[in-house]
């Protein structure tokens, strides 16, 4: 048996509600970057493509994940993008120097093609507008092109391009990472706030039913965080519905215990942004609550060195192609748990990105596709994390890491799907050397039984998946048992667990 020091207790009750889980927290992101589009979702050279050149095998993997919303077309790319280049006859579209990633953009895939692809896989689109090199006019015109039924210049132009029905894009990002010096058209918070407000005001005149996302800080490490949020939201609070958060983590120094504790930084980030939003709300005497869109998040560091060796001005080079290992999947699971713990304010999130570029899905151009290690916690959360997020009462042993103190070995979130009469416990054991015995009080769920205990585990934290071999994949041989209203289980060291209960 595990020692007394490695035991954890959890209490779960229907009354301890955080909020309904917005399915859009399981969103993702496709940018015109690397092989995300060209050689990823779109590959006319592949033997299995649809009439537009999109890969059928990639569609199936995306559909398996159940991705509810996909951010597009960027990212840094959008801050230099002229959306008009990507509509109309493909043979007439210009090839452009793409300055964000220093590639050639052929514009073979644009707004209409992406909308058709997203519709086929069952995803909504979170569209971003260019507030780097452009502004109010381009944004309102793009919205009119996408959403207005007919009878105006831009809507009739869309119809002439073969898309009679409007795309009805509901969610729009007002630019991307405008605080970043790497961004084309970087703005001060005052400059961005004014431009975003005026752009949003015009867009909501075109279509009052849309939702708008105001740019937040690009990471917790930005020197202007959280002042950026306080200043920009002072301008955009009345027109925006969400503020964005972006964060990536890495393990460059090989400290796995510290790496797996980075969800504590993410939690602090979210809490700080919530506090800043509520400060602006109080300052404005507003009755509106600002929600959070964590629309870029992932592990990203493996490919940094390789990216410095890529020649500029090519189409679809292999940029940002992180090969994810097992410990990366553990952290991704922990980040998903963090969203569920903040389901009252985090209403959208986008794993960045979806295919090839820091992605759960990889492809060979013209060849095979496969699942990276991070595919699985994302799949499990998307599939089983729908319902009401409950607040578990957790008593777990803790450890101190390089950058964090009092890190609980057990990280957990609980989702109750009343309609399906299902209860799901997501549990991450951060202990790198020992199992963790967990007892969970679920006496409020009378008549429930264990349906499944999924485990993602591997003795090698650095194990990876390839096109030829899937070394990291889940099994359903977990030890969870239910007796007299208590779930008892042993979580193996460094493991991701999904314990599913269903009413008999």
Image: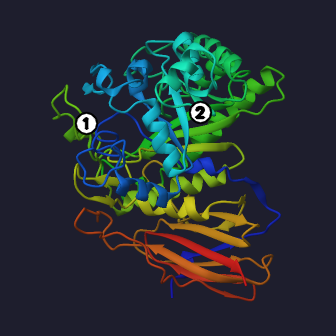
Residue 48 is marked as none
Which residue is tagged 1?
316
Graded by Cα atoms within 10 Å as few (under 14), some (14 to 19) or many (20 or more), the crowding at tag 2 reads: some
Label 2, secondary structure: give it: loop
Marks 1 and 2, how far apart in space? 31 Å
Number of numbered discs visible in the structure rendering: 2
- At a point 43% along the width and 31% down the height, the residue shown is 75
Please state the horizontal and vertical placement of residue 299, each as a whole percent of the image.
40, 48
Q: Nearer the viewer, residue 151 or 138?
A: 151
- At a point 44% along the width and 74% down the height, the residue shown is 493
Please state the horizontal and vertical placement of residue 28, each as a whole percent of the image.
49, 45
Label 1, secondary structure: give it: loop
> Which mark sits nearer the N-terminus, 1 or 2?
2
Which residue is tagged 2?
165
Please state the horizontal and vertical placement of residue 130, each as a whole percent of the image.
48, 19
Q: Quadrant of the C terminus?
A: bottom right
- State whether residue 398 appears in this view: yes
Q: Is residue 279 left or right of residue 120?
A: right
Q: Nearer the viewer, mark 1 or mark 2?
A: 2
């Amino acid at each position: 048996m595990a020692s007394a020091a490695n035991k954890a207790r959890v209490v779960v009750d229907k009354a301890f509600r955080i909020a309904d889980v917005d399915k859009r927290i399981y969103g993702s992101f496709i940018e015109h970057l690397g092989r995300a589009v060209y050689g990823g979702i779109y590959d006319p050279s592949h033997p299995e493509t649809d009439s537009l050149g999109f890969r059928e095998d990639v569609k199936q993997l995306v559909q398996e994940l159940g991705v509810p919303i996909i951010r597009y077309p960027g990212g840094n790319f959008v801050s230099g993008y002229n959306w008009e280049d990507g509509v109309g006859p493909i043979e007439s579209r210009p090839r452009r120097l793409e300055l964000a990633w220093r590639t050639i953009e052929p514009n073979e895939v644009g707004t209409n093609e992406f909308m058709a692809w997203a519709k086929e896989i069952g995803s909504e689109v979170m569209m971003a507008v260019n507030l780097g090199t452009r502004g109010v006019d381009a944004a309102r015109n793009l919205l009119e092109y996408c959403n207005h039924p007919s009878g105006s210049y831009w809507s009739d132009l869309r119809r002439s391009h073969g898309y009679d029905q409007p795309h009805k894009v509901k969610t729009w990002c007002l630019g991307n990472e405008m605080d970043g010096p790497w961004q084309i058209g970087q703005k001060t918070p005052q400059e961005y706030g004014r431009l975003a407000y005026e752009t949003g005001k015009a867009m909501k005149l075109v279509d009052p039913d849309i939702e708008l996302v105001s740019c937040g800080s690009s990471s917790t490490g930005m020197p202007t965080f959280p002042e950026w949020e306080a200043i920009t939201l002072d301008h955009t609070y009345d027109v925006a519905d969400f503020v964005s958060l972006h964060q990536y983590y890495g393990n460059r120094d090989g400290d796995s215990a510290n790496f797996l504790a980075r969800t504590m930084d993410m939690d602090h980030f979210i809490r700080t942004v919530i506090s800043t939003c509520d400060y602006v709300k109080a300052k404005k005497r507003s009755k509106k609550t600002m929600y959070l869109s964590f629309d870029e998040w992932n592990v990203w560091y493996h490919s940094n060195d390789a990216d410095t060796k890529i020649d500029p001005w090519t189409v679809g080079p292999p940029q940002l192609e992180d090969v994810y290992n097992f410990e990366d999947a553990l952290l991704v699971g922990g980040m998903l748990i963090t969203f569920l713990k903040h389901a009252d304010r985090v209403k959208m999130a986008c794993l960045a990105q979806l295919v090839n570029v820091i992605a759960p899905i990889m492809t060979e151009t013209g060849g095979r596709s496969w699942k990276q290690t991070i595919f699985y916690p994302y799949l499990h959360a998307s599939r089983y994390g729908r319902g009401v997020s409950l607040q578990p009462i957790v008593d777990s042993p803790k450890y101190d890491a390089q950058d964090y103190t009092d890190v609980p070995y057990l990280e957990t979130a609980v989702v109750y799907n009343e309609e399906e009469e299902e209860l799901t416990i997501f549990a991450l054991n951060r202990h790198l050397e020992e199992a963790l015995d967990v007892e969970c009080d679920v006496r409020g769920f009378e008549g429930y039984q264990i349906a499944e205990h999924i485990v993602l585990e591997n003795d090698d934290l650095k194990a990876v998946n390839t096109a030829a071999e899937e070394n990291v994949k889940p099994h359903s041989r977990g030890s969870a048992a239910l007796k007299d209203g208590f779930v008892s289980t042993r979580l193996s060291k460094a493991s991701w667990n999904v314990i599913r209960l269903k009413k008999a």
